[in-house]
Amino acid sequence: MSRESNIIRLQDYPDEITRTSLCKGRYEIVTTGPNAEFGFIGSDPYNTDAYTGLVVPSTPSASIGGARYLFVLARARFGSGEVGARLVGIRQYAEIVARITSGDTPLAANGDPTPPPPGAPVGSTVTFRREIKNPLWHPPDGDISWSVMVISRTVRDTRNPANSDGFIYQDSLSPALLYQTASPYTPPNGGAPWDVPIAASLGGIHELRYPWRTDMNERALDIPLPVPCDVVMFASVRQNDPTTNPTFGPSTATQFVSLIPEDRFLVAYSPFAQYGSIAGALVFKENLGDDKP
């Protein structure tokens, strides 16, 4: 094999120490995971149930000893030869949902008489959702914190018979809910992300600082990476208990319309509203040729 072709071949192996001085440009790693809503209809031409984001379990944290659900949302690996790689952008997404069984108030159900009336089939679950856009909003007994951490390139032993797609023991190289014990759920590391923040302000993000729909998100940051390393975006979620959601009486229309959209949804679907899916994204720039010393 010629020297030139060997150099080109090495570009397909990011773990190699030797890398050529080529500029890879910007790319984005986005949370993708299983979603039961697509179990029967599929989410793509390959009939998978994968979709953007990871679904937060509906069991409230208060009912499992206050345990917070720990997620890996995005992860990237960098070898020692990838000098000049930078984190240049972050995205955050969170939503609240109301999952209501057809036939329960306020949903009508299609009981399949002739002719069938409108409505979802009896017993099916209908999901209503509201994207959280107010950066400081959270339900009364729930919240989310986000962390972008630099991790040494070692991986914990993740083998466990309880593992499933998007549900992994201790650590994961792809988006997943992490667990130490599966039933009852407990998170690894006491529910906290490990190693060191990539920047002081990114070790504990308590708000939607980098909204999902932000324009020019890929230019929000410029943080060099201390290669070799992994860069991991974690989310720690305290799932709220719908029984603690606020409710309004019948004569409160004026107060209701004055609420922000997230609070309107919480009050309108008070017996059901919880965190639904969450997602994150990391945007990297690799300009190896220009940034090598």
Image (cartoon, helix red, strand yellow):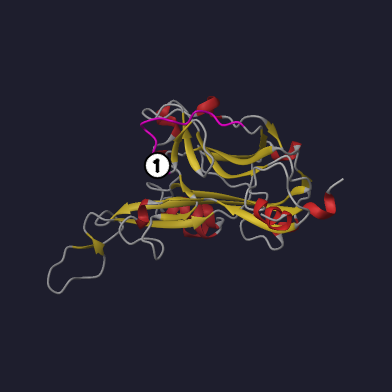
Magenta span: predominant SS is loop
Q: How many marks?
A: 1
Q: Is residue 177 visible?
A: yes
Q: Which residue lies furthest to the front in this view?
A: 1
Q: Residue furthest left?
A: 114
Quarter of the image with the N terminus in it: bottom right
On the picture, is 217 further left or further right than 272?
right
Asked if the magenta segment contains residue 221, the reply would be no
Quarter of the image with the C terminus in it: top right
Whether residue 77 is situated above or below residue 155 in the rendered picture: below
Number of other residues with Cα within 10 Å of mark 1, as a class: few under 14, some 14 to 19, many 20 or more: some
Whether residue 145 is situated above or below residue 181 in the rendered picture: below
Residue 94 lies, in percent from the top left, at: 54, 50
243 vs 255, nearest the viewer: 243
Residue flagged by tag 1: what amino acid is it? Ser
Asked if the magenta segment contains residue 163, the reply would be yes
Whether residue 17 is situated above or below residue 284 in the rendered picture: above
Quadrant of residue 128 in the image? bottom left
Q: Helix, strand or loop at disc 1?
A: loop
Residue 72 lies, in percent from the top left, at: 54, 40
The magenta segment: 154-165
254 vs 244, nearest the viewer: 244
Residue 24 lies, in percent from the top left, at: 71, 57
Residue 120 lies, in percent from the top left, at: 27, 63
Read off the residue under disc 1.
Answer: 58
